[in-house]
Structures are given as structure tokens and as C-alpha cells.
Image (cartoon, rainbow, N blue to C red):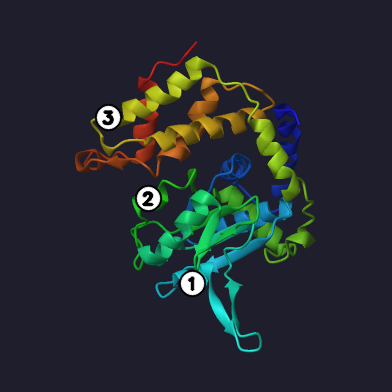
């Protein structure tokens, strides 16, 4: 597959998603980039902003096995990974697999569970495998975690550990819709739309999960000039030297910018990366990895504002 062949596929995915989603073009596009890149996504927004619906829509469009886990304060790691169970008949232990053995996993309200349970996802997200009772179990490709969380100010939530945050390719924000978007949503529900029955909405499978591996291989062919590589590295270095930050972007963050840029370029019908591709993906790659200094927060800055400032400061390659 040629990487430019992803452009019509990405367009069809957007067109199909529009049958269900309203005003979520950019968040859904970032979800698509993450899926094709092989990364995971953290969706943040207040309840009722279609985070779960967006994840279910993506899984439906790629015909992937989909599982949802509702994270709660009493959720245990074994509730996610599974456990060994003794079979009296055979006199042997067997693995009762947990819900993590799926292709697209929705970790709903992940920040309502304590760190011990959240950390149960770490190996799965990084290695696409889990170890139980000394045995390695591979997860079915294309394994992807889509985690949702409420803003940290809400009561009863826990901040995600830094090590886990770094495993997410993107942090995608899902704000309230505009007035026109809300009216369109109400119109669709008035005419019988049911978010629990996506097949009735006429969604067509666009990219079967079995073809995603081939798409990822095609993305590897996208050309990245040395100037672009230097640009990505310079933005990361600038974040580490920023007077507004106590923690800048890691090397893994720069790597994720590179990979996501290649995917986005292919989705735009190009087999090469431009500085605009880098700029587009840097914001969702960085926003959950950098930490602002207290004085920067007092000035009213947020991670997005700081990242935009960094992108303005670093010279764009010609």
C-alpha cells in the first residue's frame, strides 16, 4: 500500500463518523491518527460530551472488537487483566481472561480508579502484552486504549501517574458543543437516533482491523527530511528550557510527534512530512506531558498556550 492511499480512507472515515458525531471533527481525526500510528489516546472532557460515543464509532468503523471498562475506586488490577482459576474437573488452573483482551479498549473515567489499578494498564499499553502467573500473553492487534477522564477539579478523581500519562500518544479535549451543534444533536435524537445502535445509523465499515497493520506499514514509507527531524528535536529542547515549565517534553514525546506527523501527512495525501504536520500534532502530544510552573499558572497560562508559544519561538525549516 502506498502511504498516499490513506487519504481517501481517512476521508471516508470522517464522512461515516459525521453520521453519528456532531462538532467533533478534530477529536475524531486525532483518534484516527492515533489508531493508524499505533498509539493510545486520553480523552478529557466533562460528562456528556460524546467521549464514549466517539470511541464506539471508531471501533465500529474499523470492525474491531470493542470492550468498555468502567473505572471505579474499588476496581482491582485482576478485574482488568484476568486471573487464574482452578478447574475442579481437570485439576488444573486456567486463565480467565479479563476485558483487556480486546482490540479497542475504552477505559471509561480512568481517573476515578487509584494509581495501583491504573498502573495495571502500563505493560499492556507499552508492550501490547501482559504477564500473568509467569506467562506472557499477547494482546490482539491493533490493540488500542482510549481512556476518558473528567477534569481533575472534579470530586472523587485521582491524577494519573506521570509514567502512565507518557504512554498516551495524544491527550484530546472534548469541550461543549456550540449552540448550532447542540441543536443538530437534538434534531437527530428527535428523528430517532439511538447512540446504543450505531448500525441503525447506517455506519459502514471503512477500514477493517485486519488492514490496519498494512496501513501502519505504509506510513513507515513517509519521507522525513533532516530539517524536519531537527525541528522536532528543537521544539522538545525548547520546552525543557522554557521559563514557564518545570517539566518539558521527553524524548518519547518527540518520537511520538515524529510518528504522528508521518501518519497525518499520509492522511493528507502526501508521502512527506511538512512543518505544518508537526505543528498540528505537537499540541495533543505535549499537553499532558509538560508541567507548568505555579507563576505561569497565576499568569493565566495553560499547557496549550505554552506549546503554541514554543512553536512560535522555534525557527521553522525551509
* Distance from Cα at disc 2 to Cα at disc 3: 22 Å
Along the line of sight, the residue nearer the viewer: 7 or 305: 7
Q: Residue at x 30, y 38 (%)?
A: 301
**Label 2, on which residue?**
163
Earlier in the chain: of badge 1 and badge 3, it is: 1
Location of residue 94 in the rendering, given as x and y in whole percent from the top left corner: 60, 76
Look at 52% across and 60% down and name the residue there.
Answer: 130
Q: Secondary structure at mark 3?
A: loop
Query: Is residue 41 shown to the viewer in this render?
Result: no
Q: Nearer the viewer, residue 126 or 54?
A: 126
Q: Going by the image, does 289 lie left or right of 268?
A: left
Q: Is residue 137 left or right of residue 60?
A: left
Vertical arrangement, residue 261 with respect to residue 275, above or below: below
Q: Which residue is mark 1?
A: 78
- Write the residue at 78% across / 50% down: 205
Q: Percent x, y for residue 217?
A: 67, 35
User: Mark 2 or mark 3, which has the lower sequence index?
Assistant: 2
* CA distance separating discs 2 and 1: 20 Å
Quadrant (top left/top right/bottom left/bottom right) for the N terminus: top right
Q: Nearer the viewer, residue 145 or 177?
A: 145
Q: Is residue 11 left or right of residue 296?
A: right
Rendered location of residue 173, percent (x, y): 48, 47
The quarter of the displayed image where residue 236 is located: top left
Within 10 angstroms of label 1, few (less than 14), some, or many (20 or more) residues? Answer: some
Q: Residue at x 61, y 57 (%)?
A: 139
Q: Are marks 2 and 3 in contact (CB under 8 Å)?
A: no
Q: CA distance from mark 1 to mark 3?
A: 41 Å
Task: Please identify the residue farthest to the bottom as the structure is shown.
Answer: 88
Residue designated by label 3: 242
Q: Name the N-terminal-most of marks 2 and 1.
A: 1
Amino acid at each position: 500500500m502506498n502511504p498516499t492511499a490513506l487519504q481517501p480512507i481517512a476521508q471516508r472515515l470522517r464522512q461515516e463518523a459525521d453520521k453519528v458525531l456532531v462538532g467533533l471533527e478534530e477529536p475524531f481525526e486525532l483518534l484516527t491518527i492515533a489508531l493508524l500510528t499505533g498509539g493510545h489516546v486520553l480523552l478529557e472532557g466533562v460528562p456528556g460530551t460524546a467521549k464514549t460515543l466517539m470511541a464506539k464509532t471508531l471501533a465500529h468503523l474499523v470492525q474491531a472488537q470493542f470492550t468498555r471498562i468502567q473505572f471505579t475506586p474499588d476496581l482491582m488490577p485482576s478485574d482488568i487483566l484476568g486471573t487464574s482459576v482452578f478447574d475442579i474437573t481437570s485439576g488444573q488452573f486456567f486463565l480467565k481472561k479479563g476485558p483487556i483482551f480486546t482490540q479497542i479498549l475504552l477505559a471509561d473515567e480512568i481517573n476515578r480508579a487509584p494509581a495501583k489499578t491504573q498502573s495495571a494498564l502500563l505493560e499492556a499499553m507499552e508492550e501490547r502484552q501482559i504477564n500473568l502467573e509467569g506467562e506472557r500473553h499477547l494482546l490482539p492487534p491493533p490493540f488500542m486504549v482510549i481512556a476518558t477522564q473528567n477534569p481533575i477539579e472534579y470530586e472523587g478523581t485521582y491524577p494519573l501517574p506521570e509514567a502512565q500519562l507518557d504512554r498516551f500518544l495524544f491527550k484530546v479535549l472534548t469541550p461543549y458543543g456550540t449552540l448550532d451543534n447542540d441543536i443538530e444533536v437534538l434534531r437527530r435524537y428527535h428523528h430517532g437516533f439511538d447512540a446504543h445502535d450505531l448500525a441503525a445509523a447506517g455506519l459502514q465499515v471503512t477500514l477493517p482491523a485486519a488492514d490496519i497493520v498494512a496501513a501502519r506499514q505504509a506510513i513507515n514509507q513517509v519521507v522525513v527530511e533532516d530539517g524536519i527531524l531537527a525541528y522536532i528535536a528543537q521544539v522538545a529542547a525548547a520546552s525543557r528550557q522554557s521559563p514557564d515549565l518545570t517539566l518539558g517534553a521527553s524524548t518519547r514525546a518527540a518520537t511520538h510527534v515524529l510518528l504522528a506527523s508521518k501518519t497525518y501527512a499520509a492522511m493528507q495525501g502526501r508521502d512527506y512530512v511538512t512543518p505544518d504536520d508537526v505543528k498540528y500534532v505537537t499540541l495533543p502530544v505535549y499537553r499532558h506531558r509538560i508541567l507548568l510552573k505555579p507563576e505561569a499558572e497565576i499568569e493565566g497560562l495553560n499547557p496549550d498556550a505554552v506549546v503554541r508559544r514554543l512553536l512560535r519561538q522555534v525557527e521553522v525549516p525551509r
